[in-house]
Image (cartoon, rainbow, N blue to C red):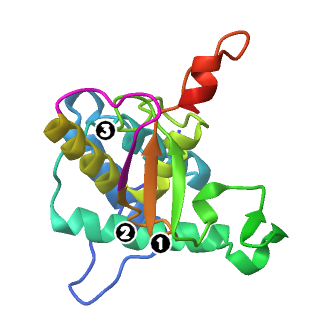
């Protein structure tokens, strides 16, 4: 497998999107002793998968401002390339009620609602397609840290039907409302309906 090399940048040069992605991967690999010697693929799609996987498995924790700056620039461009959806792109089905079907991480609205788990720090399964994983991926690693701080202060898992709000960081919306729904197996019960 061919691997990526990043050329050193001069002080006044800016990184392009590919260089940002490789920089982020290298920094995240360096944090994980068991992955430090992992090769970075040259293929762009494989790099994107590797970066998302590393972001998904990263435990909440601080990281330096340089990483955050590069990550934020990278994710803002990724999110812009996906396209932003505003209220004018949605169908108003009754006064002040709009309906739209698609990728929630594209919505430029006041807040999106995240179907969170009771730990509230996101899905740790690499590249899982649940909405929790997608929101945490495209918001960036500061979202998980914010959620972890809230949960540490709270001191217990989030009860079903309760909610917490955080900034959206790199998502086009302003906030993310994290809430835990009931886990339904079989028939929906009255208690599960109440919690919903």
Q: Residues within 10 Å of mark 1 (few under 14, many from 20)?
A: some
**What secondary structure is marked by label 2?**
helix
Report x, y in % for residue 95: 78, 73
Where is residue 141? Give x, y as percent. 33, 52
Q: Is residue 89 left or right of residue 32?
A: right
Labelled pair 1, 3 in contact (Cβ < 8 Å): no
| Element on which disc 3 rests | loop
Residue 16 image offset from top left, x and y in percent = 44, 76
Q: Is residue 3 visible?
A: no
In the image, is residue 194 above or below residue 189? below
Query: What's the residue at 19%, 37% (across, down)?
Result: 154
Instruction: Check residue 72 in the rendering and tell me which mark sits there, or answer none.
Output: 2
Query: In this picture, is 188 found above or below 165?
Result: above
Label 1 element class:
helix
Q: Is residue 17 magenta?
A: no
Give the residue pinned by disc 3: 58
In the image, residue 30 sits, relative to residue 66, either above or below, namely above
Q: For the magenta stretch, what is the residue range?
A: 155-165
Tag 2 near tag 1, CB within 8 Å: yes
In which quadrant will I find the C terminus? top right
Q: Residue at x 20, y 31 (%)?
A: 33
* Residue in front for this viewpoint, 178 or 52: 178
**In the image, residue 46 above or below residue 189:** below
From the viewer's side, name the closer residue of 53 and 102. 102
Does the magenta segment cover residue 163? yes
């Amino acid at each position: 497998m061919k691997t990526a090399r990043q050329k050193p940048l001069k002080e006044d040069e800016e990184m392009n999107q590919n260089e940002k992605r490789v920089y982020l991967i290298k920094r995240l690999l360096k944090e994980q002793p068991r992955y430090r010697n992992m090769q970075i693929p040259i293929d762009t799609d494989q790099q994107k998968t590797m970066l998302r996987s590393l972001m998904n498995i990263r435990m909440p924790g601080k990281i330096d401002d340089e990483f955050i700056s590069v990550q934020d620039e990278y994710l803002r461009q990724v999110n812009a390339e996906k396209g932003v959806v505003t209220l004018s792109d949605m169908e108003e089905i009754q006064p002040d009620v709009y309906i739209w079907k698609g990728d929630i991480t594209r919505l430029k609205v006041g807040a999106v609602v995240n179907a969170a788990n009771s730990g509230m720090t996101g899905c740790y399964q690499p590249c899982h397609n649940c909405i929790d994983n997608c929101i945490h991926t495209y918001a960036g690693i500061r979202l998980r840290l914010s959620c972890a701080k809230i949960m540490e202060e709270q001191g217990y898992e989030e009860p079903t039907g309760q909610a917490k709000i955080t900034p959206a960081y790199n998502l086009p919306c302003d906030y993310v409302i994290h809430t835990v729904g009931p886990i339904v197996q079989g028939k929906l019960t009255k208690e599960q309906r109440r919690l919903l």
